């Protein structure tokens, strides 16, 4: 690299002079205990209650035995407060009382709603506890259920880990780009009445490891495009490989190396940007080296998407949040970070992203240009804003060349999928019923939402070109389906393949921040393939 190129890169890296603050992610210690709540010492006892737990008898005392004993201990204050504040145990409701003369300073009630049989219900308890603890500035918290009868031992273990996950992610705030921020105070959480012993402890460690991956994924998506360039994304991925070098290796290919691999489709998208493309490949190998299955996770890695010459314009085009267009890559590398800590045996996993920006310049791709992918197929680019699939095409060909059995790709691919499924459900496409079932089963454990969509072959008709093998977009109708059919052209038929369109759930509009979507389900999927 010549001196002027180095200077230019340095100038680009600091556009806007913004540097993320180096903020340590808070460590919370989780312990499971079997004890009487009244003996617990600490800042806040949080009791999770169902709507039915709030029933009172004719003397306006709680029918629920746990709440009745608790209320007697504090002289009926709880029943009064609940009535005054109209607390009914609905999901998202919480109330806190300051107490005197007991082992704990505050008592909090958090509502679960009508059912406590789902993982999501317990994650919400954790989130609510985090919120209550933040408001009460608590260092130490205990969590218990008002009624735990009818909950199986297996659900108890999963519930404990879901509460832990909810708490960690609830406490976490991304303050790297604020000029000042408060440190979270919460240090210890005791989970009472969910069993104890090595099985639960292992599950809690697993939850903590997964959360570190989810947080990493969130940070990648939240980082603006002037900070997280393709080069910066490659650097972040390489850092994980260095951190966990016992199981991870990193290979980063530059534009020249991608050219040698004939990745014309990917390089066509990258051509307009002054930030160079970086093709990122992390590989996880189990500590003992014994591999029974080879998997790949391919994530779309557009660090910014302007749309190119088909620029995103008009209200609702969302150009201002297009830093999220690398959400698939964030999920892949978040999963890599978690799995590197968990170290599952028997599986080799490749985490791949063709990272670049879709910008506009004289060197860029024009609508109508024909690009040639690394498997030799030609694509007439009738819309430069259907660019994610062009980068994924070469990434999928590369993944299949790693000798894998299964590949899952994740991409913030189409607005059409958000129209179909709304903002919080990802669409999944696969010719393999078995692989679709694996992902759905994994999602039932994690609480993330997926819905299987049809790979309707007859729709391929709209993707035919007059001059090339195919066009890259087929009009408005069934846009998420035609996008999936396009990707299928670049997958080896011997490899089981599944595509996740996560354009909706990557981002939480209400909170204006990333969700870390995909990480926990990918980790769970790899674990199932490991056992």
Image: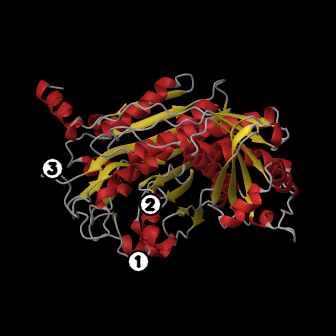
Q: How many marks?
A: 3
Vertical comparison of 458 with 121: above or below: below
Vertical comparison of 243 with 138: above or below: above
Name the residue nearer the viewer: 462 or 236. Answer: 236
Q: Is residue 403 left or right of residue 147?
A: left
Q: Please give the name of the residue rendered at 46% of the width and 55% of the height, measured from the top-left corner.
A: 506
How does the figure colour the protein chain or chains? secondary structure
Q: Residues within 10 Å of mark 3 (few under 14, many from 20)?
A: few
Residue on which the image places disc 2 = 503
Residue on which the image places disc 3 = 363
The x and y percentages for residue 443 are 64, 55
Name the residue nearer the viewer: 379 or 68. Answer: 68
Does residue 418 appear in this view?
yes
Numbered mark located on residue 375 in the image: none
Q: Is residue 393 left or right of residue 18?
A: right
Name the residue nearer the viewer: 185 or 248. Answer: 185
Q: Element at badge 1? A: loop
């Amino acid at each position: 690299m010549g001196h002027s190129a180095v200077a230019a890169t340095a100038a680009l890296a600091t556009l806007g002079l913004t540097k993320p603050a180096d903020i340590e992610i808070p460590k919370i210690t989780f312990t499971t205990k079997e004890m009487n709540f009244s003996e617990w010492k600490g800042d806040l006892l949080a009791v999770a209650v169902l709507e039915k737990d709030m029933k009172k008898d004719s003397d306006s005392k709680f029918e629920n035995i746990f709440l009745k004993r608790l209320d007697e201990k504090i002289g009926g204050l709880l029943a009064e407060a609940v009535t005054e504040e109209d607390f009914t145990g609905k999901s998202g409701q919480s109330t806190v009382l300051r107490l005197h003369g007991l082992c704990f300073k505050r008592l909090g009630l958090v509502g679960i709603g009508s059912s406590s049989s789902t993982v999501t219900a317990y994650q919400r308890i954790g989130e609510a506890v985090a919120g209550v603890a933040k408001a009460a500035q608590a260092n130490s918290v205990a969590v218990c259920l008002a009624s735990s009868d009818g909950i199986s031992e297996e659900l108890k273990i999963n519930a404990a880990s879901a509460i832990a996950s909810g708490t960690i992610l609830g406490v976490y705030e991304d303050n790297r780009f604020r000029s000042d921020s408060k440190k979270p105070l919460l240090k210890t959480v005791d989970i009472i009445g969910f069993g104890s012993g090595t099985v639960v402890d292992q599950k809690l460690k697993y939850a903590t490891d997964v959360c570190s991956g989810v947080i990493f994924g969130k940070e990648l998506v939240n980082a603006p495009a002037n900070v997280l360039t393709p080069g910066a994304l490659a650097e972040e991925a390489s850092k994980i490989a260095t951190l966990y070098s016992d199981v991870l290796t990193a290979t980063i290919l530059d534009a020249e190396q991608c050219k040698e691999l004939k990745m014309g489709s990917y390089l066509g998208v990258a051509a307009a940007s002054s930030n160079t493309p970086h093709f990122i490949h992390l590989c996880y190998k189990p500590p003992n080296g014994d591999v029974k299955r080879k998997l790949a996770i391919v994530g779309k890695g557009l660090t910014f998407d302007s749309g190119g010459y088909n620029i995103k314009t008009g209200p609702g085009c969302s150009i201002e949040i297009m830093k999220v267009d690398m959400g698939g890559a964030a999920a892949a590398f978040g999963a890599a970070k978690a799995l590197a800590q968990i170290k599952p045996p028997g599986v080799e996993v490749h985490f791949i992203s063709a990272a670049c920006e879709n910008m506009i310049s004289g060197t860029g791709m024009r609508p109508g240009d024909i690009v040639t992918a690394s498997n030799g197929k030609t694509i007439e680019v009738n819309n430069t804003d259907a660019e994610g699939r062009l980068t994924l095409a070469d990434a999928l060909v590369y993944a299949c060349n790693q000798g894998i059995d299964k590949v899952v790709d994740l991409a913030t691919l189409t607005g059409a999928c958000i129209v179909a499924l709304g903002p919080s459900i990802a669409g999944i496409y696969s010719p393999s019923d078995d692989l679709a079932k694996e992902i759905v089963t994994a999602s039932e454990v994690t609480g993330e939402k997926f819905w299987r969509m049809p790979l309707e072959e007859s729709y391929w008709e709209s993707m035919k070109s007059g001059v090339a093998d195919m066009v890259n977009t087929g009009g408005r109708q069934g846009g998420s389906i035609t996008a999936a059919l396009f990707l299928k052209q670049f997958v080896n038929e011997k490899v089981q393949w599944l595509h996740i369109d996560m354009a909706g759930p990557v981002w939480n509009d209400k909170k204006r921040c990333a969700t870390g979507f995909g990480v926990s389900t990918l980790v769970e999927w790899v674990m199932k393939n490991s056992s």
